[in-house]
Amino acid sequence: MTEAVIDVKLLEAQHVLQTYKRQPVVLERGEGVRLYDDQGRAYLDFLSGIGVASLGHGHAGLARALGDQAGSLAHTSNLYFHPLQGELAAKLSALTGLERAFFCNSGTEANEACLKFARRYWHTRGDRGRTKFVAFSHSFHGRTMGSLSVTWDEHYRAPFEPLIPGVTFVDGADPQALAAAVTPETAAILVEPIQGEGGVRPVSPAMVKAIEDACARTGTLLIADEVQSGSGRTGAFLASPAAGLTPDLIALGKALGAGMPVGAAMVSADVAATISAGDHGTTYGGNLLACRAALVFLDELDRGLLAHVRDVSAHLFEALHALASRHAAIRDVRGAGVIAGLDLDRDAAPVVAAALERGLLINRTSTTVVRLLPPFIVTNAHVDEAVGILDEVMTQL
Ligand code: PLP
């Protein structure tokens, strides 16, 4: 078949399960912060495939490393050692302060692993009734059954019930409700230091204090879901320390693989001591291609990418606050590093659609929030271009 006769949208309409509502764009290639569609049209990418393409698109070092790795050894399974998993785990351990890594392939699997490890911790310690979880309003932890059970939005959960029992959702603005919800039966509290899908909402200092108190009072474990906020997106490797959170387990994903599907559950020495061989596993998790991508990404962080994120972030938030001062429809500007949300007094969908028409990729979360998640390599000039487009769009609202 020649390229001309392949109708991508028709083929998908006929054969791909229709679980996604795609934008009417066929993206074919990328370079840095730009993406190009099948008509050759350029887009400024301020979404990075929902927080994934941390090094941008077509990164030469990543392409070389993955090409070399694929040409040598791509996958061995977890039945054997290979040279890269331990190296990556050691680096992640140093970066997170948590002793051990379990590798998987996505954010939801990282959370799934954390939920299992939390249950296993209490089971091993003989506290077998300690199986419950506490999560927050607006939380998003993924679509598999365990992660879905602790995901707040009812329309994601309702069609798939019954989910895992014993989950309590606490209003993120109500620290007293957290104190009441956490009991000696709580296996773990799950928190996103900055909620991503939930509308770019940072956890409040009052809630951090309530979490700390509840952990001290009951001994419950704390799981930080840093799938979106972590791996450098806020300008630090993790968002938890700046928020004042000290998790026992951390879920990582998205930016860590720079485009390769990589997830990791980081666990403390205490938790790790309660996990035995055979308790959890995956065929692909931590394979050579995945580890190689994550190692290239961590090398880039070492070479100054985190400092770059902090620099460009200052410019980004200055520009977004200036934008908000010009447009009354913007009620709030939230975020850190290169995760930003503009909370509007209306549905954000028309803004996202109008931005796409002007060649800017962003998306909507939590109905009223315009979310920006550019690649970490974004520059001040890209920020000015994106905010200029948003200015035009907001003017015409
Ligand atoms: N946790 C958080 C905080 C997320 O933002 C997401 C995805 O948006 C997930 C978990 C699920 O990750 P994945 O889609 O890779 O399964």
Image (cartoon, rainbow, N blue to C red):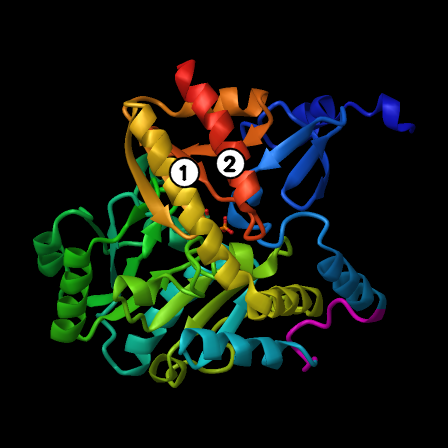
The answer to whether the beta carbon of the residue marked 2 is less than 8 Å from any atom of ligand 1 is no
Q: Classify residue 98 as left or right of residue 54.
A: left
The stretch of residues the image draws in magenta is 72-82
**Earlier along the polypeptide chain: callout 2 or callout 1?**
1
Residue at (18% x, 71% y) in the render: 215
- Is residue 126 shown to the viewer in this render? yes
**Residue type at numbered disc 2:** Asp
Q: Amino acid at mark 1?
A: Ala
Contact check, label 2 and label 1, Cβ < 8 Å: yes
State how far apart marks 2 and 1 are (Cα): 7 Å
Choose top left, top right, bottom left or bottom right for residue 267.
bottom left
Which residue shows up at 75% across the image and 65% down it?
Answer: 65
Residue at (23% x, 77% y) in the render = 127
Q: Is residue 78 magenta?
A: yes
* Numbered label attached to residue 319: 1
Q: Which mark is residue 384?
A: 2
Q: Let me know if residue 21 is in the magenta part.
A: no
